[in-house]
Image (cartoon, rainbow, N blue to C red):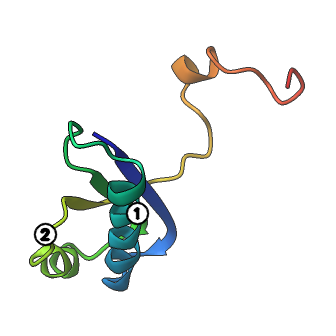
Amino acid sequence: CYIVIEIKAGKFKPEHLGQLGFYLTVVDRKVKHPQDGPTLGLLLCKSKNKLVAEYALADKAQPMGVAEFKLLEDLPADLQAGLRSIEQI
């Protein structure tokens, strides 16, 4: 299946799901093949009100989810070892 991920730098708003639904429909019609599973949508927001997100998702026919993300000041040491530095790039 295909997974569409949209990242919003701010707070979750119900209208964001309309935009994500648009992207899912485009992938379903232009990219997805009949043998593929359903296209999944994930909306990542800096913050969300859980109740608002539940109401916004309640009547959606397309498989979507809303989650929060947290920015870290420093990359964890185990991840830093696998990435090149800015100077190396």
Query: In this rendering, is residue 30 above or below 60?
Result: above
59 vs 63, left or right, is left
Asked where in the image residue 37 lies, by quadrant, the reply is top left
Are the two marked residues, 2 and 1, in contact with CB atoms closer than 8 angstroms?
Answer: no
Please, is residue 84 above or below residue 26 in the view? above
**Residue assigned mark 2:** 61
Using a 10 Å C-alpha cutoff, classify the residue at mark 1 as few (fewer than 14 neighbours), some (14 to 19) or many (20 or more). few
Q: Is residue 68 visible?
A: no
Report helix, strand or loop for mark 1.
helix
Q: Amino acid at mark 2?
A: Ala
Residue at horizontal 15 percent and vertical 78 percent from the top: 51
Circle 2 — which element? loop
Indicate the position of residue 24 as horizontal and vertical percent values.
Answer: 34, 61
Identify the mark at residue 7; answer none if there is no mark. none
Residue at position x 35%, y 59% in the image: 29
Q: Residues within 10 Å of mark 2 (few under 14, many from 20)?
A: few
Expressed as whole percent of the image width and height from the top left, the position of residue 9 reads 54, 68
Q: Residue furthest left?
A: 58
The residue where tag 1 is placed is 26
Where does the N terminus fall, quadrant-wise?
Answer: top left
Measure the alpha-carbon separation of dots 2 and 1.
Answer: 15 Å
Rendering coords of residue 11 (x, y %):
42, 76
Q: If you read the primary sequence from the N terminus, does the residue marked by circle 2 or circle 1 appear first?
A: 1
